[in-house]
């Protein structure tokens, strides 16, 4: 159905953008509104960096597309090591950082643009996880979107499926992260004022997660932007790449993580 929608000037639009990695102007072709559309229009498209322009967005930008059997996914977070530090402040998390072909955070403003909906589309968010023992797991959430910047890019997710567990809604009651704004060390939007963990009072979850930004609630059991820990040093740390419904009981920092989104058509329910 993608080809029934008029994306005038998006798919084959020659523009001139400033290439941030080279520091010079380079002619680039806008290849679609997102990775899902690119894969739909070009089924043989392979994974790599593409230029997209979501509907209603004036400035195109680059993304990394994972072109899988079930469609094109736009990657907005990747962690595989300690080369890229994720202890960043609000402005940097908003803009994005890292290398699109390696470890990076795409940017809250770009993820908002990709998930604000319209034209009958929703977004599915997928989290892929890798451990140090050769295992993998995933979690998928329907109806994924972020609130506006004034709403601190509030997290909204729908139904869960997968084998990693629903860590966003929590390993135990009272720590649901759905509906909370994004927090960094310089912009606290979590639910702790303070949170009491045994004999420890926690006011700012981002500090205990090594400065990593995330959608904390009462800190919560999902957090993938903390410090990366190597093999042998990945168990028992308060900071890390945590998906607590997958590993435990001691805190376990994953070897790698990837977060990405795919556009899907909204289900229309009609009365009989």
Image (cartoon, helix red, strand yellow):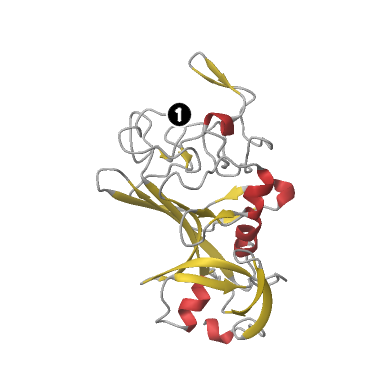
**Which residue is drawn at the image coordinates 58% and 34% (left, top)?**
206
Image spot of residue 80 (x, y percent):
40, 50
**Which residue is drawn at the image coordinates 55% and 39% (left, top)?**
212
**Above-or-below relation of 213 to 262:** above
Task: Classify mark 1: residues with Cα within 10 Å, few (<14), some (14-19) or many (20+).
Answer: some
Which residue of the protein is positioned furthest toward the top in this rendering? 199
Q: Which residue is mark 1?
A: 238
Image spot of residue 227 (x, y percent):
47, 37
**Which residue is drawn at the image coordinates 47% and 62% (left, top)?**
101
Image spot of residue 216 (x, y percent):
56, 37
Q: Is residue 263 visible?
A: yes
Left or right position of 147 against 124: right
Residue nearest the observer in this picture, 77 or 80: 80
* Numbered disc total: 1
**Above-or-below relation of 235 to 257:** above
Left or right position of 166 against 154: left
Q: Is residue 162 visible?
A: no
Which residue of the protein is positioned furthest toward the left in this rendering? 133
Image spot of residue 202 (x, y percent):
57, 23
User: Could you tell me which secondary element the residue under label 1 belongs to?
Assistant: loop
């Amino acid at each position: 159905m993608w080809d029934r929608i008029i994306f005038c000037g998006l798919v084959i639009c020659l523009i001139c953008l400033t290439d941030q990695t080279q520091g010079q102007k380079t002619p680039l072709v806008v290849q679609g509104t997102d990775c899902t559309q690119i894969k739909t229009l070009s089924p043989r498209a392979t994974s790599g960096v593409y230029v997209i322009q979501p509907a209603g967005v004036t400035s195109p930008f680059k993304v990394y597309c994972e072109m899988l059997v079930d469609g094109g996914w736009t990657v907005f977070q990747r962690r595989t090591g300690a080369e890229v530090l994720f202890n960043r402040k609000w402005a940097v998390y908003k803009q994005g950082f890292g290398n699109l072909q390696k470890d990076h955070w795409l940017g809250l403003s770009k993820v908002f643009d990709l998930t604000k909906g319209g034209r009958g589309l929703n977004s599915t968010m997928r989290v892929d996880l890798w451990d140090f023992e050769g295992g993998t797991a995933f979690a998928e959430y329907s109806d994924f979107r972020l609130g506006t910047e004034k709403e601190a890019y509030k997290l909204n997710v729908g139904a869960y499926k997968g084998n990693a567990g629903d860590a966003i809604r929590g390993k135990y009651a009272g720590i649901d992260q759905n509906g909370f704004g994004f927090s960094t060390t310089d912009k606290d939007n979590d639910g702790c004022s303070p949170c009491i963990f045994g004999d420890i009072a926690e006011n700012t979850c981002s500090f205990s997660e090594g400065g990593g930004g995330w959608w904390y609630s009462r800190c919560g059991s999902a957090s993938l932007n903390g410090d990366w820990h190597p093999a042998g040093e990945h168990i028992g740390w308060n900071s890390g790449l945590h998906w607590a419904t997958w590993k435990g009981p001691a805190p376990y920092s994953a070897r790698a993580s990837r977060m990405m989104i795919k556009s899907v058509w909204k289900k229309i329910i009609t009365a009989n």
